[in-house]
């Protein structure tokens, strides 16, 4: 009898972690390698947040919290959603989870049946398609182009809808492309989805704060789809709290209870100290954390300039998040030194082995012609990494 479930057999390992583990192994073997693999802020957790965590430990917040999170945290999330996004929620609509990753899973587990379709504009974040598969659903991909900043149009969205479509799942700002949807683009998308009440929008806004251009817009701001939208957000990116594992969903009433039911059977409430610390994080003036955004922006500008000099890389100008997603298709189908490069995954491996720089191939993000790298690394690391990549590609022998 087959030991494994069909579920696990149809899934892949998360490529972000596969590549970051490879870098870790190389480092352990004494190799000087720079990791631009995992997307996580390299800043320390701000002191006001740490102090709130210490206080929570000293005040013995050491027991189970309610499954969807402490009431005061859910209130703080509602205040944040009102302050930053102008959307009204009550605590019963909020479920605090072990990271935004779990929040997305909770929503998918609540709505997806075998064979249901989930629309994913590509490129998409690595875990979306795998989560859909885990739930027995089927992803329907919308192709985008670098010329269009990797964004789908409302027309493409409408064309992808079938009677089986159950959800639309995307991130804006987008991991991996660094694009974000504007007010008018979202309004057009909202007008399409409003015509199909069976479709739920899962709007992943975890990079909301890392936006260099304009005010972030949530599709839940549009009343025509508010009742169809689950907003996903969390502490990992805006507050450099990736390891603290706190994310949340804000759902319409009909969905919120289902999300809580799933979480209550899987993990219960999230870590109590991290929940208390998250209240401090959310309640502080957003300007407290602006220094991180300013720094990301400086690094973005620096890397953007350096990338122009890397041979045959095509880049868009990412205006949010902290990733570049260069198109490296020039190298696909060619032999670099002795290595045949089939796709961007082979190319990422080539860079790891020949330039000692870790990136992630684009296949698992839904684009086999691009590689993703995070610029949430120090300026020195970024300078060295770009120099290594350029030198490697300047000197490589290319055969068609
Ligand atoms: N969504 C996107 C687009 C992400 O990049 C990440 C980063 N891991 C997550 C969700 C999950 O974040 P976390 O679980 O750390 O809150
Ligand atoms: N969001 C990060 C990334 O895309 C963290 C890794 C992950 O959760 O997959 O690199």
Image (cartoon, grey):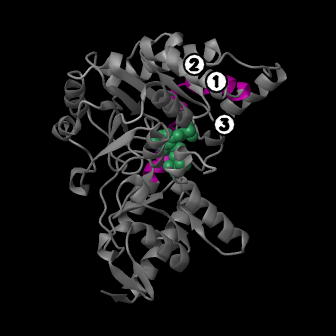
Query: Badge 1: how crowded within 10 Å, few (<14), some, or many (20+)?
Result: few
Q: From this viewpoint, is residue 287 visible?
A: no
Instruction: Tell me if 125 is positioned left or right of 276 in this view.
Output: left
The answer to whether residue 258 is visible is yes
Horizontally, is 393 left or right of 382 in the view?
A: left
Residue for point 56% across, 74% down: 356
Which contiguous range is marked in magenta?
Answer: 272-298
Mark 3 → mark 1, Cα distance in angstroms: 21 Å
Q: Residue at x 49, y 16 (%)?
A: 256
Q: Which residue position is annotated with label 1?
A: 265
Q: Nearer the viewer, mark 3 or mark 2?
A: 2
Asked whether the beta carbons under mark 1 and mark 2 sit within 8 Å of each other, the answer is yes
**How far is disc 1 from disc 2 in space, using C-alphas?**
7 Å
For label 2, count other residues whose C-alpha is less than 10 Å away and answer few (under 14), some (14-19) or many (20+). some
Q: Does the magenta stretch include residue 358?
A: no
**Above/below status of 279 relative to 254:** below
Give how far across and how far down residue 382 sits, in percent.
51, 64
Question: In the displayed structure, would residue 228 be above or below residue 240?
Answer: above
Main secondary structure along the magenta-highlighted residues? helix
In the image, 374 versus 119, the foreground residue is 119
Q: Is mark 1 on a helix, strand or loop?
A: helix
Q: Name the residue under label 3.
A: 244
Whichever of labels 3 and 1 marks the residue nearer the N terminus, that label is: 3
> Does mark 3's beta carbon lie closer than 8 Å to ligand 1?
no
Residue 261 is marked as 2
Please tell me whether mark 3 sits on a helix, a strand or a loop.
Answer: helix
Q: Is residue 19 shown left or right of residue 114?
A: right
């Amino acid at each position: 009898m087959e030991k494994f479930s069909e579920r696990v057999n149809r899934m892949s390992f998360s490529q972000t972690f596969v590549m970051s583990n490879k870098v870790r192994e190389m480092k352990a073997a004494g190799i000087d390698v720079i990791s631009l693999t995992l997307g996580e802020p390299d800043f320390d957790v701000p002191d006001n947040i740490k102090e709130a965590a210490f206080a929570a430990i000293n005040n013995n917040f050491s027991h189970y919290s309610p499954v969807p999170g402490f009431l005061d945290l859910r209130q703080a999330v509602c205040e944040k959603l009102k302050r930053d996004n102008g959307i009204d929620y009550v605590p019963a609509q909020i479920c605090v989870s072990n990271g935004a990753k779990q929040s997305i899973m909770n929503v998918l587990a609540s709505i997806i049946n075998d064979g249901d379709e989930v629309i994913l504009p590509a490129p998409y974040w690595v875990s979306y398609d795998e989560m859909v598969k885990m739930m027995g659903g089927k992803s329907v991909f919308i192709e985008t182009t670098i010329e269009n900043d990797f964004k789908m149009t409302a027309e493409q969205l409408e064309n992808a809808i079938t009677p089986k479509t159950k959800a639309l799942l995307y991130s804006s700002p987008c991991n991996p492309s660094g694009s974000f949807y504007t007010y008018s683009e979202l309004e057009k998308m909202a007008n399409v989805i409003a015509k199909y009440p069976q479709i739920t929008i899962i709007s992943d806004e975890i990079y909301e704060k890392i936006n260099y251009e304009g005010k972030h817009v949530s599709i839940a701001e549009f009343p025509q789809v508010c009742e169809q939208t689950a907003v996903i957000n969390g502490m990992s990116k805006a507050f450099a709290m990736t390891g603290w594992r706190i994310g949340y969903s804000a759902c319409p009433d009909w969905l919120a209870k289902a999300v809580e039911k799933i979480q209550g059977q899987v993990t219960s409430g999230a870590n109590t100290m991290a929940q208390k610390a998250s209240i401090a994080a959310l309640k502080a003036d957003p300007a407290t954390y602006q220094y991180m955004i300013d720094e990301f922006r400086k690094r973005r500008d620096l890397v953007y300039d350096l990338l122009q000099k890397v041979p045959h890389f095509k880049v868009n100008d990412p205006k949010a998040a902290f990733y570049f997603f260069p198109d490296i298709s020039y190298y696909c189908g060619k032999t670099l030194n002795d290595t045949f490069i089939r796709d961007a995954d082979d190319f990422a491996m080539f860079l790891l082995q020949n330039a000692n720089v870790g990136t992630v191939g684009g296949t698992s993000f839904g684009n086999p012609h691009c590689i993703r790298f995070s610029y949430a690394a120090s300026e020195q690391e970024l300078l060295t990494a770009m120099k290594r990549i350029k030198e490697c590609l300047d000197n490589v022998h290319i055969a068609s």
